[in-house]
Image (cartoon, rainbow, N blue to C red):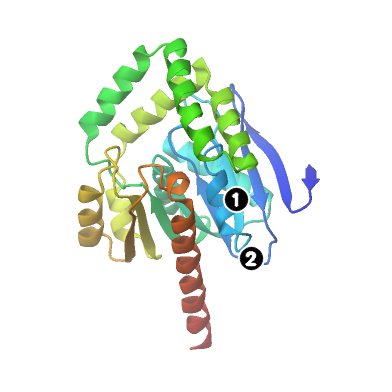
Amino acid sequence: MAIDNDRTHVRCYDTISEKLEMRVYGDGSLPTLVYLPGLHGDWTLVGSFRRALGGRVRFVEMTYPRTLEWSLDDYAAAVETELAGRGITRSWLLGESFGSQVLWGLVARSRLQIEGLILAGGFVRHPMRWGVRLAERVSGGISLGLLTRVLFGYAKVARFRYRHSPEVQANIQEFIDRRTALDLQAAKHRLHLIAQNDLRPVARQADMPVYGLTGLIDPVVPWWWVRPWLRKNCPTLREYRFVWSADHNVLGTGSKAAAEHVVRWMGEGACRGRARGAS
């Protein structure tokens, strides 16, 4: 185990392709927030959000393996294994897009003590499953060369936008470097999991506070379908907030506002916990 100041970098949970990875930032005395990444499957787009948290929480990042075989329950089991290896038994969960499916999987397993759930561009059952299936078919026909050209254009825009942040610049380069042919296949497999699974019964029975966070413009996971369902069917939904300047990647494009909402929600949860303990 290598330790670098307040960050511990751990690699474990072998698969045939690579390993699930975890990085932990911050002291164990702080409330813990576990980030479950979206379809891209790694921590390379969450650097600006982590910076915006400003060390106010203990932040745990996950990078999934490029597996083509895992079920959602396998993802959740792997996350539990990683967290248990670090002695983390209680935390908040932050599920970004596909990561929200892993989040509900952890709720269903009922092994981790979950203090609260935050969906960032997340959902329970995707409101456009036909669109997910179409994306799955299309992704199977995209060549690595075409993907590289698209990502090169993205990188040019992102590097200009974050030109004053060396850490985010490095994360963008890592994001580009990680996009391989196997990575594309793994993303396709995750799309299949989204189309295949229906976690609405789990959300209906959740007994921990639930929060939602989304960018105003999000055609990937349309909030105008997600939010009404949560309000009607999720009894512990506390709040659902918009970041007006952000898009589907709300933690990246609206990092400062997103961080403030998350820190406030976690603080409110801590207050409720102390009140229950005093009563």
Which comes before the other along the chain, label 1 or label 2? 2
| Secondary structure at numbered mark 1 | strand
At 52% across and 22% down in the image, what residue appears?
179
> Which amino acid type is shown beneath numbered disc 2?
Leu
Q: Is residue 272 above or below residue 142?
A: below
Where, quadrant-wise, is the N terminus in this rendering? top right
**Can you tell which mark lies on residue 91?**
none
Image location of residue 69, percent across then percent down:
47, 25
| Secondary structure at numbered mark 2 | loop
> Foreground: 230 or 144?
144
**Can you tell which mark lies on residue 60?**
1
> Which amino acid type is shown beneath numbered disc 1?
Val
Image location of residue 276, percent across then percent down:
48, 82
Regarding residue 41, the answer to whether it shows in the image is no
**Can you tell which mark lies on residue 30?**
2
Mark 1 and mark 2 residues within 8 Å of each other at the beta carbon: no
Q: Quadrant of residue 154?
A: top left
Q: Residues within 10 Å of mark 1 (few under 14, many from 20)?
A: many
Image location of residue 255, percent across then percent down:
48, 51
Q: Is residue 29 above or below residue 195?
A: below
At 28% across and 65% down in the image, what residue appears?
235
At 53% across and 80% down in the image, what residue appears?
274
Q: CA distance from mark 1 to mark 2?
A: 12 Å
Q: Give left or right: position of 41 versus 169.
A: left
> Foreground: 36 or 155?
155
Q: Residues within 10 Å of mark 2 (few under 14, many from 20)?
A: few
